[in-house]
Structure formats: C-alpha cells, structure tokens
Amino acid sequence: MVRHGEVLPLPTCYTERERHARHGAEVVHDCLLPAGGEGRQRRSSFVHIYPAEVRRWVHEHRND
C-alpha cells in the first residue's frame, strides 16, 4: 500500500524537496506471520526450522 503523507526529514530515501516539506510517499508492508496451521513454523530455533543436511553443513563449516 502506498500513500502520501507526513514523513520524517531524516531518511535519505526522500528527495531534498520531500524532506524539506516533510511530505512524501509512504509504503506499508504486511509483515505479519501466517496463522498457525497455515505454513507458520511452530518453533523458530535453528534445530527445528532447518533441514538436517543444512544444520550438518553449518556445523561442519562454522569455524571457516
């Protein structure tokens, strides 16, 4: 979703004119996790999320 509205003058993604006017485009991202049972992982630890071959490779190369 993109809308125009008041913005902070600090981010460099805005033009000098937008920063001075404190008005520019704003983008809203949906960062919500999927509901349980709809693809959401129950645990977020390394051991429970990644397949065994990935975990093995990481452990073998962690000191490289």
Image (cartoon, rainbow, N blue to C red):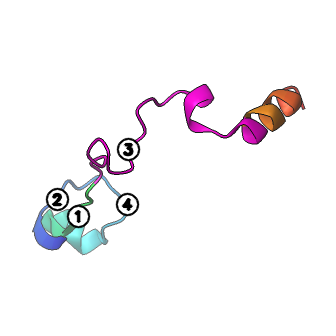
What label sits on residue 7 in the rendered view?
2
Please name whichever residue, 48 or 7, is drawn nearer the observer in this view of the structure: 48
* CA gap, disc 1 and disc 4: 8 Å
Question: Marks 3 and 2: CB-CB under 8 Å?
Answer: no
Determine which residue is flagged by label 3.
40
Please name whichever residue, 45 or 12, is drawn nearer the observer in this view of the structure: 45
Question: In this picture, which residue range is highlighted in magenta?
Answer: 31-54
Give the residue type that dot 3 points to: Arg
Q: Of tags 4 and 3, which is closer to the observer?
A: 3
Say left or right for 57 vs 55: right
* CA gap, disc 3 and disc 2: 33 Å
- Return the disc, 4 or 3, that comes first in the chain's sequence: 4
Q: Of tags 3 and 1, which is closer to the observer?
A: 3
* CA gap, disc 2 and disc 4: 11 Å
What label sits on residue 19 in the rendered view?
1
What's the magenta bit mostly, secondary-structure-wise?
loop
What label sits on residue 12 in the rendered view?
4
